[in-house]
Image (cartoon, rainbow, N blue to C red):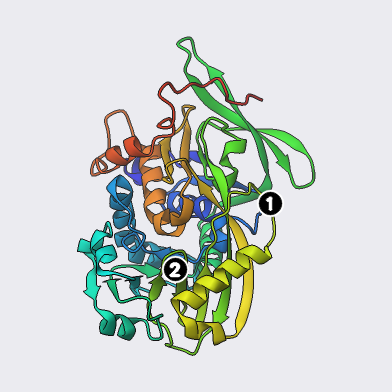
Amino acid sequence: MNPLHRSRQQQVLVLGGGLMGLAVAHGLARHGWSVHLLRCVRREAAGFAAAGMLAPHAEGLGGPLLTLAQRSLRMIPAWVGAVEEDSGLPCGWLPCGTVAPFTSEAQRQAFPTAALGHPLDRAALETEAPGISPAFICGLLFPQDGQLDSRRRLMAALERACRRRGVYFEEGVVERLCWDEDGSGHRHLVGLALRTDDGARRQLPCGQAVLCCGAWSQQLLPQVPVTPVKGQMFSVQAPRQALRRVLFGPGTYLVPRQDGLVVVGATTEQVGFTPGLTPMGQSRLEQGLRQLLPAATRWPPMERWYGFRPCTGDQQPVLGPGPLAGLVMATGHHRNGVLLAAVTAELTRVVLEADPGGCHNTSWVAPFLHAFRWNRFSPAPAQASLRQA
């Protein structure tokens, strides 16, 4: 639907103010929507913790997820340009490429996306990643991959871009979704129960909302299995240009920023929402750094942090129409949230703007709406576990 033909009163609530909520809100606001964003500020949300790799090829993704990620990667330059134009702030976009090292030629040949990368022998690997451990004898270079500085730049730029586009922010916790049921048993979103920062409770009417609650999504929709996976990280300060590519090793990755800061990540811990850093987790990262790039162990340490990734059983996102008419899902992105933010914002807008006659140039969403539907985890999806106000 052309935004110029849509009512200026068309409104949507975005539930969640992390990376995905901000990306969705900004995309909708740029297309004329009135956006009300509800958030509970959580510094341990994935967007504030992420290293910001844009590495679908180095991650070895496959199937519809790889296709979705590649589409999003192609969108990144224009998407970043829009955010920077609206915010006046840099996002830290760097098309630096990614190197994936291997300890044997057989490993490299068996890598799922090997055909999409440039093969590196040991000499070329040393050129691309100076100081890499001698245990790695070959590698793959994916020049199409890159990074965004999510923690220090992207999140701030997205929030300012949203505010300048007129997004209304409200702090609080969404406690329940409210719905009506028609005679045929279909449930329609009619509002939500909100507890504000000052402890007040109130009902907000709404007919359209986007759920972007990340690792906390299951608290609103128990039948959608999005659970937290904790990741610990730290950073070191390298000499400028000591590492120019993202180095994606087995179990450890290094993401070099333009100012020489190198992000080292990340652990994968099934500990619920248990907060804090742990000696074991930090030791695991330090060992991984030593095994991947020994020289980096001499670089001064800078900062240590953790966050919670939103993970589903198949480690793929939940996108598109949800269990209530009027509710759209944009959650469960696991370790690919920064990579998938651009395409998620666009896909969500397409779903919200779809009319009964269909939209021109939006047929691309159909395979993704099927692959990443909310009820793919159950052979007989039910609505019984929805929490009513």
Residue 31: percent from left, percent from top:
40, 50
Residue 281 position (above or below residue 292): above
Expressed as whole percent of the image width and height from the top left, the position of residue 142 reads: 28, 69
Out of 231 and 136, give the one closest to the viewer: 136
Q: Name which residue lies at 41% across and 41% down.
A: 319
Q: Quadrant of the N terminus?
A: top left
Splitting the image into 4 quarters, where does residue 387 fall? Answer: top right
Q: Position of residue 172 (x, y in %)?
A: 69, 45
N-terminal-most mark, 2 or 1: 2
Up the image or down, 129 lies above or below 326; here it is below
The front one of 164 and 220 is 220
Check the image and name the residue furthest to the top: 183
Q: Residue at x 38, y 67 (%)?
A: 81
Q: CA distance from mark 2 to mark 1?
A: 27 Å
Q: Residue furthest left?
A: 115
Question: Quadrant of residue 36 in the image?
Answer: top right
Number of numbered discs = 2
User: Which quadrant of the figure has residue 258?
Assistant: bottom left
Q: Badge 1 local density, few (<14 within 10 Å), some, or many (20+)?
A: few
Q: Which residue is mark 1?
A: 274
Q: Residue 221: x percent and y percent? A: 56, 33
Residue 259 showing in the rendered view = no
> Vertical placement of 111 versus 36: above or below?
below
Q: Helix, strand, or loop for circle 1?
A: loop
The mark found on residue 148 in the picture is 2
Instruction: Decide which of 99, 153 is in the foreground and name it.
Output: 99
Residue at 34% across, 59% down: 56
Q: Disc 2 residue type?
A: Leu
* Mark 2, other Cα within 10 Å: few <14 / some 14–19 / many ≥20: many
Label 2: element kind: loop
Q: The C terminus is located in which quarter?
A: top right
